[in-house]
Image (spheres, rainbow, N blue to C red):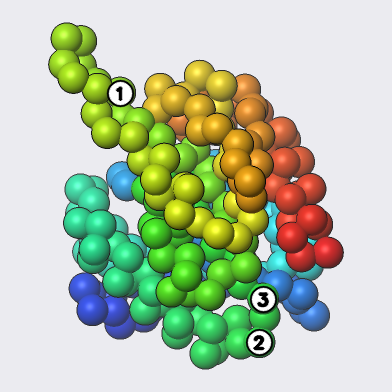
Amino acid sequence: MSPQPFDTPHGVANAFVHPVTGARAALVLGHGAGGSVRAPDLTAVTRVAREAGVTVALVEQPYRVAGRRSAAPAAQLDAAWISVVAQLRAGDLRGLPLLVGGRSSGARVACRTAPSTAAIAVLCLAFPLQPPGRAGSAPRPSRLGELDSVDVPTLVVQGVRDPFGMPPEGTRREVAQVSGDHRLAADLPAVSAAVAGWIERVVG
């Protein structure tokens, strides 16, 4: 599927829209810091969401479109994401309840910007809770505050061997533990099942 280019404050982003006839909601997903929208877990979630009647848009950040692997600063990621989501809501996703999410870095962006995008729910695949430190070094700061700041229903799908750790459940946050590590590729059927059930709870 050919990407749709979108101008943002920090360059051109791409969106790969997978429409569903008579969609009842839309899900916009972002990629990991050095990864792509073709990551195995994003592909699996796209499939299961469409089977549930949800149109999916996969957003490629401007730095990746430009061919860079090193992620842009958080403020730039957030601004580009908000811009693309707004344009999608004015076009292909017009009138649909919006779920947002992503894997790893993309999940962090979705959490930080959930109020700005007016999302009704957030999906986090392999949320990078606390970066693993080097031996003998001080622990690196936790990103739990980004999860805790989300005030809409949230699902975190996390590998039990993820070196970034396991986020706790919260008042509006479910955590589905699956086999594998940060890639979430070891048990894609479990990832799909967790997301399918969650979509029914927040959309159905």
Q: How many labels does the image show?
A: 3
Amino acid type, callout 3: Pro
Percent of width and height locating residue 59:
44, 65
Asked if marks 3 and 1 touch (Cβ < 8 Å), the reply is: no
Residue 82 visible in the displayed image: yes
Residue 63, compared with residue 161, is above or below; it is below
Q: Which residue lies furthest to the right in this view?
A: 204
Amino acid type, callout 2: Gly
> What distance separates the C-alpha of mark 2 from that of mark 1?
41 Å
Q: What element carries label 1?
A: loop
Q: Mark 3 or mark 1: which comes first in sequence?
A: 3
Q: Quadrant of residue 54?
A: bottom right
The dot on residue 97 is: 3
Residue at position x 23%, y 74% in the image: 11
Asked if marks 3 and 2 touch (Cβ < 8 Å), the reply is: no
Residue at position x 49%, y 38% in the image: 126
Q: Nearer the viewer, residue 104 or 46?
A: 104
Residue 136, compared with residue 190, is above or below; it is above
Q: Return the residue at label 2.
A: 95
Q: Return the residue at label 1.
A: 132
Q: Is mark 2 on a helix, strand or loop?
A: loop
Percent of width and height locating residue 161:
50, 19
Q: Is mark 3 on a helix, strand or loop?
A: loop
The dot on residue 155 is: none
Residue at position x 60%, y 36% in the image: 169
Q: How crowded is mark 1: few (under 14 residues within 10 Å), some or many (20 or more)?
A: some
Residue 52, compared with residue 104, is above or below; it is below
